[in-house]
């Protein structure tokens, strides 16, 4: 399962970065500025989100096929191997793709539109000119509302200089070079040149974008890999190749950091049968790590795994 999750995560993370790059390429600052009063300053978000969902579906199919090959190898003497194949056009698999596409388009579209609305409001409140507002919107593409606010606050601190600029030092995801620039400017009682501020803010924003891509890779990679694995096992049960009573699922807590979720730590080793949900320490039910039906507090940056075995064959590890 580890390698399956890694592959799915890489695919999802890269797809997210491609989506953001596409939106930026097709929505330059000048175009956003010209459309500020149209209600849609950034165009193509639903279509880009659909492309991202398409990449997730490709990872889902790949995960199902990988799981089928693995299960066929492990059960070759007990199961009709020729039937162990992932059917991407099976109704439940098709339904997953359609539901995932709708969910992702709605989620990404709503997030970006809410953020754009907030940036327009903030720009009007501060008296920023249209070019500045358009630049802020362009720079926010792909970020969360919280991350966009961090970027805006970072710029404000650098432009104010003095104590405010010093407060920006050592914040998460700034670079050592940027921090040294701030220290030198304050020490010499001079302002940081505007072009240098632009470069520092751009680098800080890109760091947050990469961080979000990594978060998406972890969360979406886990979700897609487990959903694909579950679908393959479901198809095998329906086909009569696997007895559902013999399927055992085990929650494995993999995060060894001090800030790991205590609720998930308590789940380590929890056993469930086919189709049965796990229960976190806080009482939340999850079918697998990063279950989309669970609250975000239970899923964001989760690194847990669920392993499966068929009892009559003994424990086998997924590749």
Image (spheres, rainbow, N blue to C red):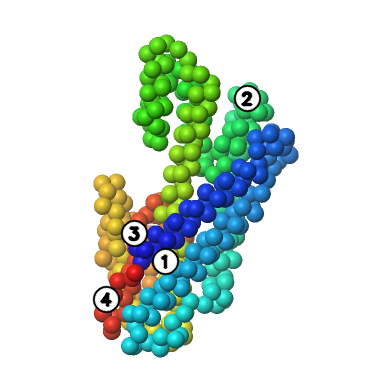
How much space separates mark 3 and mark 4, taking CA atoms?
19 Å
Please give the name of the residue rendered at 53% of the width and 27% of the height, measured from the top-left corner: 198
Q: Mark 2 falls on what kind of element?
A: loop
Q: Which of the numbered marks, if any, corresponds to residue 128?
A: 2
Q: Is residue 256 left or right of residue 49?
A: left
Q: Mark 4 falls on what kind of element?
A: loop
Is residue 98 visible in this depiction of the protein? yes
- Quadrant for the N terminus in the image: bottom left
Return the residue at label 4: 315
How much space separates mark 2 and mark 1, taking CA atoms?
46 Å
Q: Which of marks 3 and 4 is nearer the N terminus?
A: 3
Is residue 119 visible in this depiction of the protein? no
152 to 283, vertically: above or below: above
316 to 291, vertically: above or below: below
Location of residue 305 (image quadrant): bottom left
Return the residue at label 1: 226
Location of residue 175 (image quadrant): top left
Mark 2 touches mark 4? (CB < 8 Å) = no
* Front-lying residue, 13 or 154: 13
Location of residue 309 (image quadrant): bottom left
Tell me where residue 133 appears, x and y as whole percent. 63, 30
| Of labels 3 and 4, the one closer to you | 4
Q: How crowded is mark 1: few (under 14 residues within 10 Å), some or many (20 or more)?
A: many
Q: Which of the numbered marks, if any, corresponds to residue 81?
A: none
Q: Which of marks 1 and 3 is nearer the N terminus?
A: 1
């Amino acid at each position: 399962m580890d390698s399956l999750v890694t592959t799915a995560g890489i695919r999802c993370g890269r797809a997210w970065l491609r989506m953001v790059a596409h939106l930026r390429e097709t929505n330059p600052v000048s175009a956003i500025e010209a459309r500020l009063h149209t209600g849609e300053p950034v165009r193509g978000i639903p279509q880009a989100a659909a492309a991202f969902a398409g990449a997730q579906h490709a990872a889902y199919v790949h995960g199902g096929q990988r799981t089928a090959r693995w299960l066929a190898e492990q059960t070759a003497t007990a199961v009709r191997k020729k039937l162990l194949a992932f059917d991407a056009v099976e109704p439940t698999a098709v339904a997953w793709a359609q539901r995932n596409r709708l969910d992702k388009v709605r989620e990404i579209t709503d997030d970006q539109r809410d953020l754009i609305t907030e940036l327009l409001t903030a720009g009007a409140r501060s008296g920023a000119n249209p070019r500045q507002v358009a630049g802020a919107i362009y720079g926010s593409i792909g970020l969360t509302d919280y991350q966009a606010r961090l970027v805006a606050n970072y710029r404000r601190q650098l432009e104010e200089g003095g104590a405010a600029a010093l407060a920006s030092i050592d914040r998460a995801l700034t670079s050592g070079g940027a921090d040294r620039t701030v220290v030198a400017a304050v020490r010499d009682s001079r302002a940081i040149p505007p072009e240098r501020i632009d470069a520092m803010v751009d680098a800080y924003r890109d760091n947050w974008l990469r961080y979000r891509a990594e978060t998406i890779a972890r969360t979406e990679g886990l979700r897609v890999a487990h959903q694909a694995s579950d679908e393959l096992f479901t198809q095998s049960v329906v086909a009569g190749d696997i007895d559902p009573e013999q399927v055992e699922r085990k929650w494995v807590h993999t995060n060894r950091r001090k800030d790991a979720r205590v609720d998930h730590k308590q789940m380590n080793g929890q056993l469930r049968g086919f189709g049965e949900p796990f229960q976190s320490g806080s009482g939340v039910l999850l079918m697998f790590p990063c279950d989309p039906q669970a609250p975000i507090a239970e899923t964001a940056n989760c690194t847990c795994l669920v392993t499966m075995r068929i009892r009559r064959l003994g424990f086998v590890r997924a590749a």
